[in-house]
Each structure stands twice: as structure tokens, then as C-alpha cells.
Image (spheres, helix red, strand yellow):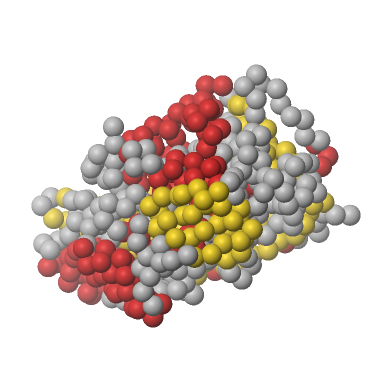
């Protein structure tokens, strides 16, 4: 059994438990901790997590809930500076050794102690070469964790790694209760245990996930008694639920909902550009897209900035690179709208237009399918506009919409097909998103495009790109690392294993009597400051 098969099976096992029993509670016997309904904040989620164990699920839906349950050793502040968190301080001893001095007197929600042994057990579980977690994509640089004493632990890198501390601050590197995970097995994904301000109570599939305030939280008991995440896939229903007082917070609003809530005196609305990129991952094993001329023709055939600007308006902006402007190492690489060049490239590869005006070769029309979960504002509308524009040019485009609870399991399947037993991916253009979580370009590039990286859904393999990335994340001087990042992106621009599209805006609405909820620059939500106000 391959590594990715194990990960996929663990996610499936978690989902199976939820489907079979409809819901699970914190306790094996089924007793549930009562959470007073009048002092619980209800948050609408558009997508349900597959698991709350980052060994099996590192999707945005899992992060949205997990940040209330788990915590990192260090965390980014609002200015993206790294600050101690579960570690009260840290230091770098040499090129590869990072020492963390842990806060004392903290327990996991299970009652197990948080100490150096617990940190080591978590890291060992995630980077186990025989059964690694999905979070290992953000821990590949780690060689091992070594216990120094009860509350001191060293994290040792395999080699000098420039963004090591930024990776430690990522929301994927929260500390799980590995001892409890060993007891629970696959059930840990639906009965998690962390050190965070809220602890798991129950999960009813397709309905809600309930968390209770951690009265023993080291940072002080939260001001609210609990948080309940309600699963509401339909954007319109989320908006109505907020207006009706059924939820207090909703995110990923549709434009129609934004317009409605702008007129609602009982709601507070915020729209901001999100430090996030949306792109199409290209299946390089696809019979048409394996041809670089076809891939390059896609970048010239339509006017991406014009279409994105016209459809998304304030809900997104055209993206001209493989990450987010402002990230260390970002390089602007715009596409040139040039239908004549697109035609020349396709003609060079033997394509010509048929009587329907669609390019055809060897009796087959040039048909490509976009796979999307329609998660962002006007995403489907945008792709339908692109479908029309491509059709006018002569490329037939289909759109496969993945809905509701199937979004993340399906994306994981598409994403891991190549790494998992070398099965050729069965997609053409896969819509993927990611954030500027470390402040550097490494996450946007390394996990998605490095040869055999755990999230490399494209099958891209370029030793020159890999070598550039080795320098980019090394202990070399920053100027040298930035130039290596630029070199790596030039390879991508030449080889085109992906097409960058847009940066979304995030829209969140809250009831007027809620405070303490905002999007952190690292692209996550924190919940410990939630409170009701008069």
C-alpha cells in the first residue's frame, strides 16, 4: 500500500464513520457536553471538512474549524512577524537546529499533558516515512524532533532551510494530541484533541460541528461558551440564516448576498482582497495538454485580465504570477492576449478548425474540461464567460462542478492520483487555490510543482526547477534565495504546468453584536477573542 493510498483511506474511513452513524460525540459512550445556546457563536460554513485530523485533511474547511481546537508552537502576528505561542520562547542553535522552550502546565483536551514528549510524538506521527500525514507537505524539511528535557524540544532540519520558522508558524503545523490519536485511530479525525480555546463536543454530518469553551485554556477562558459551525452549502441560505439570527457569522458570501446585507442595519459587512491565488493545475499527461503548444495557446487565446475584471469586479483581481504580490520571491509573469499567436501554435501542432469553428486533429475536437468547486464569489460565472470566449476562439470547454461535501474528497483524489501509485490524473484543468501563509513563495511553488511533491497533481518534473527551489529554501542569503525563486518561476512560465488566474476578495458578514472575528493575514480565522457585545 502506498503512502497516498494510506492517507486517502484514512480520510475515507473518517467520512464513513460520519455517514454510518450520522454524528459522533466527544465521549465513546455518546454523552455530550451541554453548551448554553444563548452564549454560543454560530458560524456558517460553505463546505464541510472531511476530517479534523491534519494527518488526513489539510483543506481550508478543516483549517477553519481546526484553528479553534489546535495551536502552533509559534504563530504569525497581524504584521506577519513570528511570535511565541505554545512555546514561550525559541532560538536557533545552528544552521539546522531550532530549540523551543514550551509553556508549562498546559493539557490537551483529553487530559494528556502538553510537553516535549507530546511535541515529538506529534512530529513523529506527521513525518513517519511509512505513514506520513498530509501536513508532511509542510514538514518535509524536518529530520526529527529531539526531547531535551520535559519542556524543551529541538526540531532539527535535514539541511539548512530558510523558511523553517515561517513553516513552524503555519496553521498546518498545529500540535495534535498524538497520544490520543493513537487511542482513537481513524476516529481521531472526528474526535480531535488539541490545546486550543475550544474543545470538540459533537459532529452531526451535514448539519453542524459543536465546540465548547476550554475552561482550562492557558490563555484564559473564552468569553463565549462555545462555537458551532453550521454546514450551509447554499450561499443564499447562509445570507438568510444571518438575517434570521440563526447564525452570527457567515463567510464566502455571494455577490447577491453582499448586496442584501449592505442594506441590513443588523449586519456588519467587510470586503477585502484576500492574500490568495487561484489557478488551474494542468494535467501534463492529458492527450492534448501534454503538448506545450496547446498549453501556450491557452495563455494567448483569451484576454484573462479583461474577463476577470469584467465578471468579478470588486470580488477579485487578475493574477499575474504563481503566487501573491508582496510574497518574498514573487515574480510578475503576465500572459499576452494574442489570438494570432495561439492560432499559430495550434496550427504548428497540426490543429485546424472544423465546420463548427472548433480546432480539430485526427478527427478529435480540442475539448478541455474545467473542474471547479465554485467556492469563490462569481467563480462559476467567470468560468462560463471564459467557456464562451474560448469557444469563440475555437477551443471547446466543459465545466464539471463538484458540489457540497464532495468538494474536498474529490479534490484530494484528483490532487493525489499521480503520487498515488503513478495513476495518470483523470482531469484536464483542475481549479486550485492557495494562500500566502508563510510570506514567501515556497508553499505556492514547492508543494505543487517539485518532482513527486505530495500535492503535485500535474505530474510536472523538471530537475532545473527542483534545483532552483533547493536554493530558494536553503540557508543562503536572502538576495540569492529571491533570485532562485525568480528562476524557478521562469521555468514554470516556460513549461506551463499551471495557469494563474485571479486573487479573490473575501467577504464576511457578522451580526452587529459580535466582535473578535476577522481574517488573519496568514489566511486563517482565530476564535479566542470572540464575544457578544451590547
Image quarter of the N terminus? top left
Image quarter of the C terminus? bottom right
How many circles with numbers are drawn on the protein?
A: 0
- Residue at image position (38%, 52%) is 143
Q: Position of residue 514 (x, y in %)?
A: 78, 54
Q: Position of residue 231 (x, y in %)?
A: 61, 39
Q: Specify the quadrant of the image occupied by residue 106.
A: top right
Q: Nearer the viewer, residue 113 or 484?
A: 113
Asked whether residue 165 appears in the rendered view, the answer is yes
Answer left or right for 123 relative to 526: left
Q: Is residue 165 above or below residue 42?
A: below
- Residue at image position (61%, 53%) is 102
Name the outermost residue toward the top.
Answer: 29
Answer left or right for 314 relative to 410: right
Q: Is residue 151 above or below residue 83?
A: above
- Residue at image position (39%, 77%) is 477
Name the outermost residue toward the bottom.
Answer: 479
Q: Position of residue 351 (x, y in %)?
A: 14, 61
Answer left or right for 498 relative to 292: right
Q: Is residue 95 above or below residue 113?
A: below
- Residue at image position (74%, 29%) is 33
Amino acid at each position: 500500500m502506498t503512502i497516498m493510498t494510506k492517507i486517502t483511506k484514512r480520510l475515507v474511513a473518517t467520512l464513513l464513520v460520519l455517514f454510518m452513524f450520522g454524528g459522533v460525540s466527544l465521549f465513546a459512550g455518546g454523552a455530550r457536553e451541554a453548551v448554553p445556546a444563548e452564549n454560543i457563536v454560530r458560524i456558517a460554513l460553505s463546505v464541510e471538512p472531511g476530517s479534523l485530523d491534519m494527518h488526513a485533511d489539510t483543506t481550508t474547511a478543516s483549517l477553519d474549524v481546526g484553528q479553534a481546537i489546535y495551536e502552533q508552537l509559534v504563530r504569525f502576528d497581524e504584521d506577519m512577524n513570528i511570535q511565541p505561542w505554545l512555546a514561550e520562547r525559541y532560538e536557533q542553535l545552528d544552521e539546522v537546529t531550532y530549540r523551543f522552550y514550551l509553556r508549562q502546565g498546559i493539557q490537551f483536551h483529553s487530559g494528556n499533558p502538553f510537553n516535549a514528549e507530546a511535541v515529538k510524538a506529534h512530529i513523529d506521527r506527521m513525518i513517519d516515512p511509512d505513514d506520513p500525514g498530509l501536513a508532511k507537505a509542510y514538514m518535509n524539511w524536518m529530520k526529527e524532533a529531539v526531547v531535551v528535557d520535559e519542556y524543551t524540544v529541538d526540531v532539527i532540519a535535514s539541511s539548512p532551510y530558510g523558511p523553517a520558522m515561517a513553516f513552524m508558524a503555519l496553521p498546518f503545523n498545529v500540535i495534535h494530541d498524538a497520544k490520543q490519536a493513537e487511542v482513537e485511530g481513524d476516529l481521531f479525525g472526528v474526535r480531535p484533541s488539541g490545546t486550543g480555546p475550544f474543545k470538540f463536543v459533537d459532529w452531526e454530518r451535514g448539519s453542524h460541528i459543536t465546540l465548547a469553551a476550554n475552561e482550562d485554556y492557558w490563555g484564559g477562558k473564552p468569553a463565549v461558551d462555545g462555537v458551532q459551525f453550521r454546514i450551509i452549502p447554499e450561499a443564499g441560505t447562509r445570507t438568510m440564516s444571518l438575517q434570521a439570527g440563526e447564525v452570527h457569522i457567515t463567510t464566502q458570501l455571494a455577490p447577491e448576498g453582499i448586496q442584501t446585507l449592505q442594506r441590513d442595519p443588523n449586519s456588519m459587512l467587510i470586503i477585502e482582497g484576500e492574500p490568495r491565488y487561484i489557478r488551474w493545475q494542468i494535467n501534463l499527461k492529458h492527450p492534448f495538454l501534454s503538448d506545450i503548444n496547446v498549453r501556450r495557446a491557452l495563455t494567448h487565446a483569451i484576454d484573462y485580465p479583461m474577463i476577470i475584471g469584467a465578471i468579478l469586479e470588486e470580488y477579485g483581481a487578475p493574477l499575474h504570477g504563481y503566487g501573491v504580490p508582496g510574497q518574498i520571491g514573487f515574480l510578475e509573469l503576465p500572459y499576452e492576449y494574442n489570438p494570432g499567436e495561439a492560432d499559430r501554435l495550434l496550427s504548428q501542432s497540426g490543429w485546424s478548425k472544423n465546420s463548427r469553428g472548433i480546432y480539430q486533429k485526427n478527427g478529435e475536437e480540442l475539448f478541455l474540461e474545467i473542474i471547479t468547486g465554485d467556492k469563490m464569489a462569481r467563480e462559476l460565472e467567470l468560468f462560463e464567460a471564459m467557456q464562451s470566449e474560448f469557444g469563440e476562439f475555437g477551443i471547446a470547454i466543459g465545466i464539471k462542478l463538484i458540489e457540497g461535501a464532495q468538494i474536498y474528497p474529490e479534490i484530494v483524489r484528483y490532487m493525489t492520483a499521480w503520487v498515488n501509485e503513478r495513476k495518470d490524473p483523470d482531469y484536464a484543468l483542475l481549479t486550485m487555490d492557495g494562500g500566502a501563509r508563510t510570506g514567501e513563495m515556497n508553499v505556492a511553488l514547492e508543494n505543487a510543482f517539485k518532482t513527486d511533491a505530495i500535492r503535485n497533481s500535474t505530474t510536472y518534473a523538471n530537475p532545473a526547477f527542483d534545483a532552483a527551489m533547493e536554493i530558494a529554501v536553503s540557508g543562503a542569503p536572502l538576495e540569492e534565495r529571491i533570485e532562485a525563486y525568480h528562476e524557478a518561476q521562469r521555468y514554470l512560465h516556460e513549461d506551463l504546468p499551471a495557469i494563474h488566474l485571479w486573487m479573490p476578495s473575501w467577504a464576511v458578514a457578522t451580526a452587529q453584536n459580535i466582535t473578535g472575528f476577522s481574517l488573519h493575514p496568514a489566511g486563517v480565522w482565530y476564535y479566542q477573542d470572540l464575544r457578544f457585545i451590547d
